Amino acid sequence: MKDAVLVPHEHKSLSLGRRRLLQLAGLATASTAVAGLAGCGTSTSTSEPADNTPLTIGYVPIACSAPIAIADALGLFEKHGVNVALKKFSGWADLWTAYATEQLDVAHMLSPMTVAIDAGVTNAARPTELSFTQNTNGQAITLASKHYGSVKSPEDFKGMVLGIPFEYSVHALLLRDYLAAHGVNPVSDLELRLLRPADMVAQLAVEGIDGFIGPEPFNERAIKSGSGKVWVQTKQLWDKHPCCSVAMAKEWKAEHSTAAQGVVRALEEAAAILSTPAQFDASAKTLAQEKYLNQPAELLDGPFSGVYQDWHGQTHTDLDRMSFGDPTDPAAIVWMATQIARWGLGGDTLTMDDSTIIAAAESVLVPGLEVKGKHLSINGMDFDPLAPTRGYDHMDSVIFR
């Protein structure tokens, strides 16, 4: 069943529920652990048995990686018995290679990457678990400011060059689906160009691209520089969509179960801190440091507080604009696997077959999670995770005939 697909000039009031629920849940650690966060030292107390085997966690410096960075800044990995060092990667291709070649056993990943590398859809294959969902929502489609006034709907994207951070990203998959829902062929009607997140705004400024779908703080940076305007928040296309995760190699987790548990507990504690309004400012200042995001703290204020500008420059507040530490949603992972297959990114391994898609999604879920019949509303379409290909074959045959 199709609902109306939201476009920027159809802004609706949004829920403010999630962070209030987190506060009501009694996350007491957040109120004590972050005092003076921006200039804090690390905690040396260890509350759990330690696995002193050194562990390098790779990450890309975007706002989605905040739980990893805050856990490091506050000594939460050490607190939970894990000897962690962080390694920063400028883009997803380099991180993907490092993980696939076993230079990393635990890594910040775009959630669809876990499905792709676990299923072996390319020559990079490694059994992988999606161990922790770092964030939901918090992305946007940003267009060059020069397009304001001339672009009225997604149909006007035809002929554009749009940046995407990686093929196996919720960004690329959601953008393709969004365009297709509006009758735009994302394969032939425009160009999707792979760009590192940090290069997107620079390319926008020199008119190398017409826009991009990407993470924060780069949408905010485009607005502040005057080079771009946010067309739509991805939350308005798919509310509560997961973006980034922390992935673990299954063989490493089997050998280091105590460390694996410690990593997840540290990330859970960091996510609780990031979800506490009283700590937004201190968290932003910590993440702004060169060793983490190396971005001005003020560019993180909006994503954390929920304040944003729409396409017309009007200001809105939505406390769920970007959330941290929500439970992994199996139905969302099925949708990602479906889109990988739908757009021919699954090779001969991940194809448009319901049982194949569901198996690929379930393979990356932590033990105890399973795919059930919870439906999702994505770009105006009702998605059934137990019948994931339903509707797409017909729609694509009409759009792309």
Image (cartoon, grey):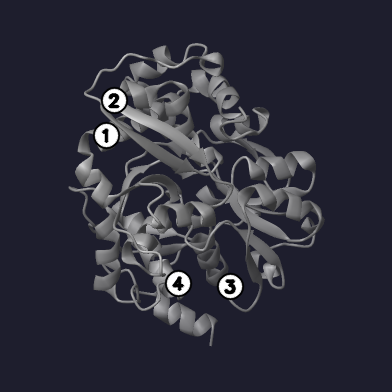
Circle 4 sits on which residue?
345
Q: Compare marks 3 and 1 and give the one earlier in the sequence.
A: 3
Q: Position of residue 277 (x, y in %)?
A: 50, 22
Q: Quadrant of residue 78?
A: top left
Q: Position of residue 284 (x, y in %)?
A: 58, 26
Question: Is label 3 in a helix, a strand or a loop?
Answer: loop
For image coordinates 32% across by 61% down, the residue present is 118
Estimate the spatial distance between the alpha carbons at disc 4 and disc 2, rounded to whole Å. Answer: 39 Å
Q: For marks 3 and 4, give the one nearer the viewer.
A: 4
For image coordinates 40% across by 76% down, the residue present is 347
Q: Which three-letter amino acid code belongs to the residue tagged 1?
A: Ala
Q: Position of residue 100 (x, y in %)?
A: 40, 57
Estimate the spatial distance between the alpha carbons at disc 3 and disc 4, rounded to whole Å. Answer: 13 Å
Circle 2 sits on which residue?
81
Circle 3 sits on which residue?
186
Question: Is label 1 in a helix, a strand or a loop?
Answer: helix
The residue lying furthest to the bottom in this view is 401
Apparent side of residue 222 relative to residue 308 in the rendered image (left or right): right
Question: Is label 2 in a helix, a strand or a loop?
Answer: loop
**Mark 4 crowdedness (10 Å alpha carbons): few <14, some 14-19, many ≥20:** some
**Mark 2 crowdedness (10 Å alpha carbons): few <14, some 14-19, many ≥20:** many
Q: Compare marks 3 and 2 and give the one earlier in the sequence.
A: 2
The answer to whether the residues at label 3 and label 1 have Cβ atoms under 8 Å apart is no
Circle 1 sits on which residue?
259
Estimate the spatial distance between the alpha carbons at disc 3 and disc 2, rounded to whole Å. Answer: 46 Å
